[in-house]
Amino acid sequence: MTKNKYVFLSRPRRFGKSLLTTTLDSYFKGDKELFDGLKIMELEKEWKQYPVLHFDLSGARHLPVEQVKDELNRQLDDLETVYGSNPAETSPGMRLAGLIKRSSQQTGAQAVVIIDEYDAPLLDVLHDTERLEAVREVMQEFYQRLKMCEAMIRFCFITGITKFSQLSIFSTINNLTNISMDDRYAAICGITEQELATDMAPDIAMLAQKQGCTPDEMHEKLKQMYDGYRFAKSSPEIYNPFSLLKCFNHKDISNYWFDSGTPTFLIRQMQHFQTDITAMDRIETVAAAFDQPTENMDDALPLLYQSGYITIKEYDRETDSFVLAIPNKEVRESWNEMKKELIVNN
């Protein structure tokens, strides 16, 4: 990843994207004490400090276009208290470019730009053409400065649920690298089987004692409930980190992911395409069917995959085809709840 200046990662909600961005934030700021005891302490020798411009757009969800601008400007205000401002910079994009330039000049180092949940302002207006276009214009004006400031940027990392190509707002960044289905980064978010069996063995033991079973029996219950996600052709199976940690905290196996909030945009998409949920489990298909631009979708499959309700279960190299299916028991239960919402909303 160090060879790529602009990197994009798509993962479902509650899968640790924001934790990853704050980790990168701390790394590029040179906060080495936060990484004590980790492998990176052996690998990183310089710990060079860079100015980090970190944006979290999750707060711009469900907002009209003017309030999306307000949210961008609020975060720009905070960064300008550190690196200064210029009254001539009147738009969010102009202000971003000014911050990149001033932060680089003041520190003598290229800037690092981190944008978490880039697509939050757009997801709920996918089929409202007028609102989508208005919000997209604001976001395009903001993002296009990233390409214009390339010489002053050390690294740019962008996360979201949908793929960058789907909303046509990164057209100016022609060297944006999408690592969402790259085998090398398949386990970058979430918890692997090995991590659960080693680092979390004490948590499994405590949960097993509370639930009156053996640690091995509890491990199997956790696997059935929260495991099963795959994000690349050769991906290991990944546990839902949000649900797993909630389970350990509450000492109870339950459906935490769906209860944390049904994605409104997904419900609307399924209504729009009149999706038959029962027909979506175990589908044999090609990547183009679930990795396509949102505006070109003719069914809800791409968003179901990107939202984590359907995941990769098998990959056939000879036919270059995938089998997609519901990941685990927790999501299967969530499907049943989603059916109820679809019935009520219809």
Image (cartoon, rainbow, N blue to C red):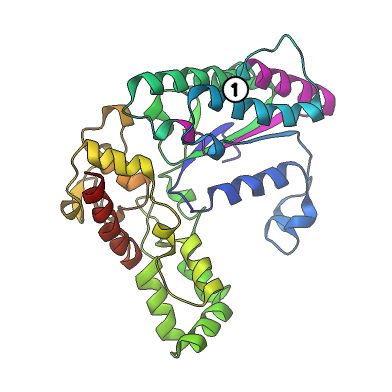
- Amino acid type of disc 1? Leu
Q: Is residue 120 magenta?
A: yes
Span of residues in magenta: 94-121
Q: Is residue 85 left or right of residue 153?
A: right
Instruction: Measuring from the top left, give residue 171's x and y in whole percent.
Output: 45, 20
Q: What residue is disc 1 on?
A: 146
Asked where in the image residue 148 lies, by quadrant, the reply is top right
Q: Is residue 208 magenta?
A: no
Q: Quadrant of the N terminus?
A: top right
Q: Quadrant of the C terminus?
A: top left
Instruction: Measuring from the top left, give residue 194's x and y in whole percent.
Output: 49, 70
The residue sitting at 39% across, 34% down in the picture is 124
- Viewer-nearest residue: 331 or 100: 331
Q: Is residue 293 visible to us here?
A: no
Q: Is residue 248 visible to us here?
A: yes
Q: Residue furthest front?
A: 344
